[in-house]
Image (cartoon, rainbow, N blue to C red):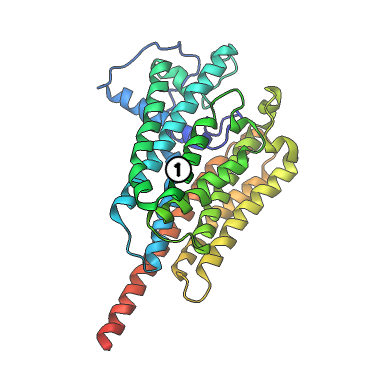
Amino acid sequence: MSEFAPTGTPVSDPGHALARGPETKASAPRGTGRATASDPESVRVWIRLVRPPLSLLGLAPTAATLALLWANGAHLLAVPAFFSIVAVALVLSGANLLDEYLEFERAERASAVAGVLGPGEAGALLAAAGIAPLRALRAGIGLLIAGTLAGIPLVMSGGGGVALLGIGGLGVAFLYSSTSFALKRLPGGEGIVFLALGPGIAAAVALAQRSRVSGQVLLTGCALGLLALALVEAVHLMSKERDERLGLRTLVSYLGMRGSRLLYILCVIGAFVLLALVALPKGAPHGALAVLLALPAALVALTGMLRARNTTALALIPRQTLRLYAFVALWLVVGLLVSGVVARLVALLLGSGA
C-alpha cells in the first residue's frame, strides 16, 4: 500500500510517504540501478520499503496494553513482553513489504508503472528502488515467517487463545493485499483494520502476559483501533476519485464524502471517549487522561477534515491523522506508566507507615 496515495489501500498507506525520499520516481525501470547490500543508500531503500512509521499502528496497542497491565499492578513477564513487540514489528514490516510488491506487480500488469503510478502511490517506491521485485517478495515472506517464529514464546505463555489470535493476525497480514480478492479492496476491509490493529493485538498481549482480557484492555484496544480506522478513511477519502476510475469499491464509495467525514469524526471522538472510560472510574489508572494533551493534534485533524474540499487539502489529512495517533499513543503510555509509578510509591509509603 502507499501512504496517502490514491490506491484504495488503507492500513499501510501513510507511512510510505513519510518514509519516502524526494528522489522517488515511479517510472524507474524494473530492477535497474541495483545497489549492493552494503550500500548505505540500499539500506535506506529497504527501510523505506517496510514503512517504519506504520509499525506504530501495531506497536502502540502492544505498548499501551503492557503499560495498562503494569499500571494495574501486574508483574509483567519479560520474555512475552519482548517477543510481543518483536513479533508485531516483524509481521507489520513483512505485510508492508509484501503489499508494496503486490501493488507493483498489479500496476505492471496494467502497464501502469510508467503511466498511472505516481510518486507516493502503492508500488511506486519499489519501481524506483533498483531492487529486483522478487527480492522484495522473498524479504516480505521472510519477515512474516520471522514474525511467526517470534510469536512462539507468546503461544507458550498464553496458550490457545494467543495461538488463535496470532493465526488470525497473520491471515489478515497476508490476505490484506494478496489474491485477487484482497481484503483491502473490499468494503469490509476497514473493519478488519479496526479489529486487527486494536482489540485483537490488545487481547493477544494480555493473554500472553497470563492476564485476563479485561474491559479496560478491550477499551484501550478499541480506542487505538478507531484511530487506525480514521487513518484508513482519511486515505480513502483522498483517493476516492482515482479508486472509482480503477473500479475499487471501498467503504467511502458507499458512504460518500459526507458520510465518510462523519465516520472519521466519530472515530476520533470515540477514541477519546473510550480512553476516558478507561481512566475515570474509581481505582482506574487516572494517568491515562494524559491523552487529553493530544487534543490540539485532534483539533487540527478534525478541522482539516471538515474544511477540506479538494484533493490537495484531503492529502494533508492522513499525515495529520498519523500525527494524532502518535501523540495519543505517546501520552497514553506515558500516563499509564506514571499511574503505575504513583500507585507503587503510595503502596510503599503506606507499607512503611504501617
Q: In this view, does 151 lie to the left or right of 12?
A: left
State the residue in front, 87 or 16: 87
Question: Above or below — where is 315 with respect to 217?
Answer: above
Question: Above or below — where is 117 with respect to 341?
Answer: above
* Count of labels in the image: 1
Q: Where is residue 122 drawn, in percent x and y?
A: 53, 26
> Which kind of residue does numbered mark 1 sit on?
Gly
Q: Residue furthest front?
A: 160
Would you identify the image quadrant in which residue 207 lies?
Answer: bottom left
State the residue in front, 193 or 241: 193
Q: Where is residue 306 drawn, in percent x and y?
A: 68, 48
- Residue at 51%, 46% (x, y): give it: 197
Q: Quadrant of the C terminus?
A: bottom left
Mark 1 lies on a secondary structure that is helix
Q: Is residue 312 left or right of residue 220?
A: right
Q: Where is residue 93 drawn, in percent x and y?
A: 41, 34
- Residue at 47%, 22% (x, y): give it: 101
Q: Residues within 10 Å of mark 1 (few under 14, many from 20)?
A: many
State the residue in front, 288 or 21: 288
- The answer to whether residue 60 is seen in the rendering is no
- Residue at 44%, 26% (x, y): give it: 22
Q: Where is residue 110 drawn, in percent x and y?
A: 60, 13
Q: What residue does disc 1 label?
A: 166
Question: Above or below — where is 20 with respect to 73?
Answer: above
- The answer to whether residue 87 is seen in the rendering is yes
